Amino acid sequence: MKKLTLLLGAVLLSMTLTGQITTPAPSPAATLTQQVGLTDVTVEYSRPAVRGRAIFGALVPYDALWRTGANKNSTISFSDNVTIGGTEVSAGSYAIFTKPGASSWEVMFYSDTNNWGTPQNWDASKVAATVTAEVKTMPMSAETFTITIYDLNNNGATLGIMWDKTYVEVPFTVPTKKKAVESIETVMGGPSANDYYAAASYYYEEGEDLEQAKEWIDKAVAKNGQAYWIMRRQSLIYAKLGDKEGAIDAAKKSLAAAEAAKNMDYVKMNQDSLKEWGAM
């Protein structure tokens, strides 16, 4: 009986130790995802509340490094290179650290995001960009700390930070025009040399319409006249169509380009074909 009592006691103690109590987090986590132009921007942060406390200059001291929120440092991620305060910031994730002041904040984008709070040892070389943001006083209090992305346009947006009656903003720009122009030029310019090469190669290998394969391989060569592998395929298509003269000409060009590139495999293949066609 004594052993049974001890066993039950041990089980109950184990259940007590391993049980979990679920309660709301004092500073709940939040994730904000926003597409700005053609760039994906994601902010992850925790949201403390005022709860009747004096915030800036008290709970959050002036001119001291702040994690910009609660718990783990707040982070922002960009899918493309962006420009913040005139500085180009590479695509990737950054911690948002700030030094709040009475009239302005220093907002820093720090490349090391693995900090609970502020870094133990600050490394200035990890600061990708720094912006001085003017403090604006809001007419009403924001009870919960909030980071926003607003004032969206094709080429940028504004990162806003607000808590209590304090608000600061950091504009940034994104490479929408560059990406859009590149996309338009790619699509409107038609298939690339490799696209034409792949289509012609498939038709050649599968015994499909060789005249169509010839048209495509000619376009591939016109787009990339130094690609010895494309001219090699051109020579084979010409040969299969019975155009020996065209095949020899293409093989000679492929041979010269392969020799310049020091690709001995293609040198040998072209030499073998030229011997077979009576050109060597």
Image (spheres, rainbow, N blue to C red):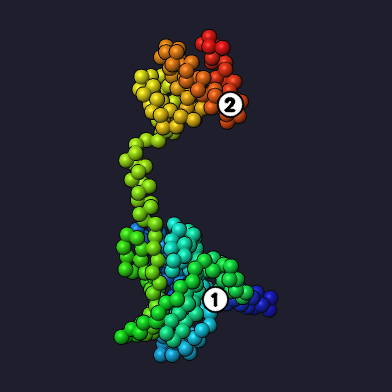
Which percent across, then down, holds residue 180?
Answer: 35, 51
Instruction: Name which residue type carries label 1.
Output: Gly
Residue located beneath label 1 in the image: 117
Count of number-bearing discs: 2
The residue at the far top in this view is 278
Question: What amino acid is labelled 2 in the image?
Answer: Glu
Q: Residue at x 59, y 20 (%)?
A: 268
Q: Which residue is mark 2?
A: 259
Image coords of residue 178 (percent x, y): 38, 52
Q: Nearer the viewer, mark 1 or mark 2?
A: 2
Residue 198: image quadrant is top left
Looking at the rendered structure, the secondary structure element under dot 1 is loop
Residue 263: percent from left, percent from top: 59, 28
| Residue 149, label in figure | none
**Residue 192 picture quarter:** top left
Q: Is residue 97 above or below residue 102?
A: above
Along the line of sight, the residue nearer the viewer: 99 or 259: 259
Sequence-wise first label, 1 or 2: 1
Tags 1 and 2 in contact by the CB under 8 Å rule?
no
Quadrant containing the N terminus in the rendered view? bottom right
Q: How many residues crowd mark 2 within 10 Å: few (<14), some (14–19), many (20+)?
A: some
Tell me the element at label 2. helix
Q: Residue at x 49, y 68 (%)?
A: 129
User: In the image, is 120 to the left or to the right of 36?
Assistant: right
- x, y percent for residue 48: 44, 80
Comparing 104 with 233, the one in front is: 104
